[in-house]
Image (cartoon, rainbow, N blue to C red):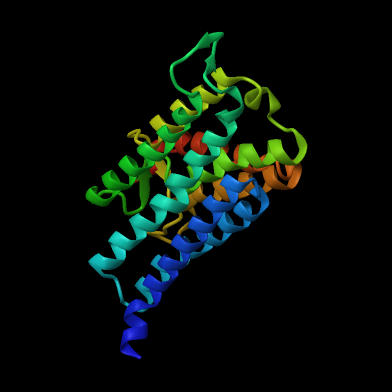
């Protein structure tokens, strides 16, 4: 029983890793709908592993390391492969120039900066009630959300038909991951309404965007999250 209590959160974390790995495999083989399901499962498990560790008082250095390693696959490798797939049709053509390499590999910059972002987070003791830079799960929702909406109904086609715009999204996404801008974290230091205006604004606006726009609203919720976080910078501490 003690073993189960001490390792239940770690099992959830490993479930996150398994789901993310399956998602990557299906993405490579072209079944993006299974990948979408895997991302949802990984997001749920990533949320509950920390929650259960705290509830069971089973926080451990092992759990911290496992969490980052699992996130590296589910929310680091996976979004990089998404952009890799998106850039694949362009081959080595970029702005009318034949490059000595296929530009799809540029998409993996997201993976590299996700790794850097997770390493920075592990060493930064300030990020208890907010994040510095966009967290990797949100970035994954942004990148895959754009891709999913495009594959489902052709939304955001202007980006996926232009290699320059895709490369720009890749670079901006990578830089936001390691930016010093504070981002809202759904962790409550206080239950007073006045102390949680940023979270309330985020939840209310995010739900409205999804209700109004449905699938195309998924990546837009992340953009809204970034804007709301910037607007409430002084209240995030």
Res. 177 visible in picture: yes
Res. 234 visible in picture: no
Q: From what the image shows, is residue 100 above or below residue 185? A: above
- Counting from the top left corner in percent of width and height, residue 223 is at 55, 35
Report the side of 43 relative to 219 (left or right): left
Extreme residue toward the top, this view: 96
Q: What is the quadrant of residue 189 in the picture? A: bottom left
- Counting from the top left corner in percent of width and height, residue 32 is at 64, 48
- Counting from the top left corner in percent of width and height, residue 177 is at 39, 37
Q: In which quarter of the image is the N terminus?
A: bottom left
Extreme residue toward the front, this view: 100
Q: At 58% across and 42% down in the image, what residue appears?
A: 144
Q: From what the image shows, is residue 30 above or below residue 193? A: above
Numbered marks: total: 0
Q: At 53% across and 15% down in the image, what residue appears?
A: 94
Report the side of 59 relative to 104 (left or right): left
Q: At 39% across and 58% down in the image, what residue appears?
A: 70
Q: What is the quadrant of residue 214 in the picture? A: top right
Foreground pick, 215 / 204 = 215
Q: From what the image shows, is residue 63 above or below residue 25? A: below
Foreground pick, 41 / 220 = 41
Foreground pick, 119 / 104 = 104
Extreme residue toward the bottom, this view: 1
- Counting from the top left corner in percent of width and height, residue 206 is at 62, 46
């Amino acid at each position: 029983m003690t073993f189960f209590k001490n390792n239940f959160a770690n099992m959830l974390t490993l479930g996150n890793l398994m789901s993310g790995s399956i998602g990557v495999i299906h993405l490579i083989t072209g079944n993006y709908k299974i990948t979408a399901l895997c991302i949802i499962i990984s997001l749920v498990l990533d949320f509950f592993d920390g929650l259960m560790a705290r509830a069971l008082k089973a926080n451990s250095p092992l759990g911290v390391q496992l969490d980052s390693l699992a996130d590296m696959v589910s929310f680091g490798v996976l979004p990089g492969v998404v952009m890799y797939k998106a850039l694949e049709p362009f081959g080595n053509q970029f702005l009318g120039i034949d490059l000595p390499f296929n530009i799809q590999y540029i998409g993996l910059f997201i993976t590299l900066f996700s790794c850097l972002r997770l390493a920075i987070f592990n060493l930064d003791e300030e990020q208890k009630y907010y994040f510095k830079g966009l967290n990797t799960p949100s970035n994954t929702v942004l990148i895959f959300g754009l891709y999913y909406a495009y594959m489902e109904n052709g939304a955001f086609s202007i980006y996926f038909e232009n290699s320059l715009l895709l490369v720009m999204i890749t670079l901006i996404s990578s830089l936001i991951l390691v930016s010093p801008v504070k981002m809202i974290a759904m962790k409550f230091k206080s239950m007073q309404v006045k102390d949680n205006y940023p979270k309330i604004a985020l939840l209310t606006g995010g739900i409205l965007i999804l209700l109004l726009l449905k699938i195309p609203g998924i990546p837009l919720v992340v953009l809204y999250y970034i804007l709301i976080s910037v607007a409430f910078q002084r209240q995030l501490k």
